Amino acid sequence: MNNPVLNREGLPLFDQIKPDHISPAIESILKEANTLIDSLKEMSVTASWINFVEPIEIISEKISRAWGQIEHLNAVVNSENLRKSYNDNLIKLTEFYTNLSQDESLYKKYQSLKNSELFNSLTPSQKRIIENVLREFKLGGAELNEKDKKKFKVIQEKLAKLSTQFEENILDATNEFSIFVDHLDELRGIPEENIKKAFAEAKEDKKEGYKFTLHFPSYLPVMQYADSRGLREKLYHAYATRASELASPKFDNTRLIEEILELRYESSKLLGFENFTEMSLVTKMAKSSEEVIGFLMDLANKAKPFALKDMDELKSFSKTLNIEKLEAWDVAYVSEKLRQAKYSFSENEVKQYFPEHRVLKGLFKVVETIFKLKITKSDAPTWHNDVSFYSIKNENDELVGQFYLDLYARNHKRGGAWMDEAISRYKNSLESSHPVAFLTCNFSSPSDNKAALFSHDDVITLFHEFGHGLHHMLTKVDDYSISGIKGVEWDAVELPSQFMENFCWEWDVVKHMTEHVDNKDPLPKALFDKMIQAKNFQSGMQTLRQIEFSLFDIRLHTEYSDQNKINPITLLETIRDEIAVVRPPSWNRFPNSFSHIFAGGYAAGYYSYKWAEVLASDAFSLFEEQGILSSHAGQKFQNEILSKGGSRPAMESFVAFRGREPSVDALLRHNGMA
C-alpha cells in the first residue's frame, strides 16, 4: 500500500510516481477487482443496489483513478520506460474490461435486478446506470457464444494496442523532425519572439542558426508569417506527411489504419451490426449514419457559397503578393496578410495583449460571475514545474472541485489540448470525493523573462477546455458512473466546451482579460471592434473543413466492409470533390495523423463537434437575451446541464434549459452565414 499510484488520501502523488510503480499497482488493483467480481457472481442473495451494483461502482472508480494518473503521465511526460509500463498494463486492463463486459453471470444478475420489484424503488440515476450497464454488456459481447467471445476479446486487445501505437507514431514523428535555418533572409516576417525562441532552441541543441519544429507554437508562426515560401513549403510537407510512408517508415500509420478499420468492422459484425457506425451510434444522440450525413450535407450546402467567396477573395489577393498559384503552404500566410489588409491588424498584434495571468484572471471572472463560484490557487504535487493547481468553492465557501493547469508545449508531451478526469465526484456507503480535472494545452511558454503570450485562438482553446472541466467539476451527481461527463452521449459532450468559447467574443469579458506585455495598456476597443469584424473571416472555409473531416470519419466507418476495403485517401479525395474549396496536394496524408478517430474516442463521432456547436450556439443565445454575464442564465445552465452529468438524456437536459429542442439558426448567425 506504499505504492504512490494507489494513494487515495487526497490528491495524486505525482512527485513520487515512477514507471516501476505502475505494474505492481495495476496488478494489485486488478487482483482486488477479480476477487470482488468472483464473490459477487457466487453470492446467493438477490442482487440489489447496495450488495451488487455499488461494490462494482466502487472498484471501477478505484481502477479509473489509478489508471487515469498513469494515462495522464504517459501523455504529458512521455519516456521510454513510462511508455513500456503503460503499454504492458494497457493490455492487462483491456483484458480485464473485456472479460467483465462478456461475463454472462454478471449480465444475468444485472438483468434480474432490472426485472425485479427492487428496480422500481431505485433513484432515476441508479436506474440509468443499470440500463447503461446492460447496454455496455451487449456492446461488450456478453450475448455472444464462447467462440465469438474469444474472438471479440482478441479484437479489443489488438485495437487498444494499435490505437496507442498510432498516437505514439505521431508523437515520435513530430519530435523527430526539425529544420535549422542559417540565413536571416529566410526568417523575414516571422515575429521577433518566435525567432528568439528558435535561436534558443538551436543553442540548446548546440547547433548554429535557428531551429523550427512541427510542434504548433513553432510551426504555426512560420506558416502564418514567414515571407520565405521555401521555408513554409518544407515545414508544410513535413507536417502533412507525418506518420506516413512519405516520411519516416518506422512511424508510418498506414498499416495501422487498415488494421484498425478491419478490426472495428469485424467487432461490429460479431455484435450483429451492419457496420462500425451503427455500433458507435448506440451511445449517441444521433440514431443513424443517414441522419448524421444529412445534417452535415445540409450544413455544407449552407456554408459552401460563403466558402467559395472566401476562396475567390484569397486567390485574388494572393496575386498582389506575387503568388500566381495558391498552394496549401500559402493559405495561412496569404490569409493572415489578407486579414491585415482588410481589418488593419494582425494576430500577432492582438497576441501582445493576452499575457497568461490576465487571460486566466478574465476566464476565472466569467466563471465566478455566472456560476457564483470562487477560484483560488492551491498547492498539490505535480508532474512538471510548469503545472499549477486551483480550487473552486461555492458561495458557502464549500469545496466544489479542483484542477491542474498544464499550459505549455514541450518535448515528450502529446500535442493538442484536452480535459481529462483525475478524480470524479461520487458518494457511496463507504466514502465520497469531490471532482478533480486535468486541463492540458500546448501554448508557447514564457521567454525573455516575459509572461507567456496567448493568441486569441489560444484563449478560445483555453475557454473550450475549461468548459469540459466545468462539466466534470460542477456535477451534482453522486453516482460514479454518470457523474460529470460520464454517461453523457458523445455528441453532447462538446456542448459545455463550445458554449464557453462564445465568451471570447464579448467585450464585457475581453476587456477584463487584456494587458499589453510592454506598456500594460488594455486592448483598445477599436482593435477589438476590428477583431469582431474579422470574426467570421473565412468562416465558410473553416466550416467546410470541419464538415470534410466529419464526413470522412462517418463515411469511412459506414462504407468500410470485407467486400469494400476503402482506401482512406481515395475516400477523402471523393469527399473533397463534393464539398471542398481548399484542395491540399495529393501527397497530403491527413488521415495518418487524425488521432481523434484512430486513437481517441471520436470514431464515427467526429461530427459531434459540429452538432455540439449547434447546441452551444443555441444555449448561448439565452445569455445574449438575458445578459452575457447573467448569473440567472448561468445558474440555469449549471442546474440543467452541467450539474446533471449523464443522469438523464442530453436532449432532456437541453430542453429543460432552453425550453425547446435545438435550432441551427444561432450557429449560422454566429458564423455570419445567416
Image (cartoon, helix red, strand yellow):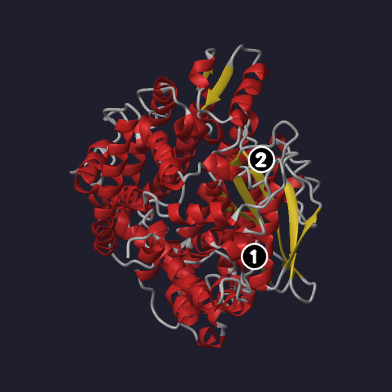
Q: Amino acid at mark 1?
A: Val
Identify the residue at horizontal 64%, vertical 30% (top origin).
81
Q: Secondary structure at mark 2?
A: helix
Residue drawn at the location 67% of the way across and 70% of the way down:
369
Given this view, does label 1 or label 2 mark the residue nearer the observer? 1
Q: Return the x and y of residue 498 as percentages of the image width and height.
A: 49, 60
Mark 2 nearby-residue class (10 Å; few <14, some 14–19, many ≥20) = some
List x then y, in percent, for residue 122: 56, 83
The amino acid on which the numbered mark 2 sits, given as a three-letter code, is: Ser
Q: Which residue is mark 1?
A: 366
Quote the CA–CA distance across marks 1 and 2: 42 Å
Vertical position of residue 325 compared to residue 259: above or below: above
Residue 277, how many percent across, how many down? 31, 56
Q: Residue furthest left?
A: 563
Disc nearer the start of the sequence (1/2): 2
Say which of 259 and 297 sits in front: 297
Above or below 664: residue 451:
above
Specify whether residue 648 is in view.
Answer: no
| Disc 2 target residue | 23
Residue 400: image location, x then y, percent: 72, 68
For label 1, the SS is helix
The disc placed on residue 98 is none
